[in-house]
Amino acid sequence: MSTKVKIRQFVLSNYLFTDDESKLSDSASLMESGTMDSTGILELIMFLEEQFMIKVTDDEMVPTNLDSIDNVVAFIERKRQSS
């Protein structure tokens, strides 16, 4: 299963309570759309750390890295390349 699919499934099932892929755009802001709040972002970070065996540092907890499916996937890929 691809990184994008794992992240989409996590967000869809835990925040939108559906498996309907059409309910979530890859580029949509998770915060602005109301899909997640700050607590949801922290839960997403815990999921990413466990699922992808990475460490998200305080300075990486920014919208550029975590505010859309596309941003999260790009962030994970950068983390993998740097390790």
Image (cartoon, rainbow, N blue to C red):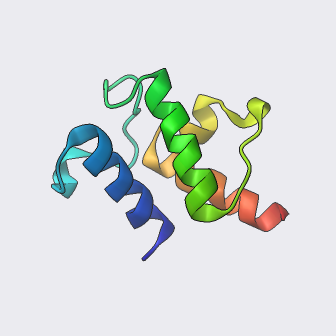
What residue appears at the point 35 percent right and 47 percent down from the top-left corner? 11
Residue 41 seen in render: yes
- Identify the image quadrant of residue 42: top right
Give the farthest residue toward the bottom.
1
Instruction: Give percent across and percent down for residue 2.
Output: 46, 73
Instruction: Give percent across and percent down for residue 39.
Output: 47, 25
Instruction: Give percent across and percent down for residue 50.
Output: 59, 57
Give the farthest residue toward the right.
83
What residue appears at the point 54 percent right and 56 percent down from the top-left corner? 73
Instruction: Give percent across and percent down for residue 58.
Output: 76, 31
- Identify the image quadrant of residue 29: top left
- Measured along the vertical axis of the image, is residue 31 above or below residue 7? above
- Measured along the vertical axis of the image, is residue 42 above or below residue 27? above
* Side of 49 relative to 31 (left or right): right
What residue appears at the point 48 percent right and 50 percent down from the top-left corner? 70
* Side of 82 relative to 60 (left or right): right
Locate the C terminus and report the quarter of the image it occupies: bottom right
What residue appears at the point 44 percent right and 31 percent down from the top-left corner? 40
* Side of 53 relative to 5 (left or right): right
Residue 74 seen in render: no
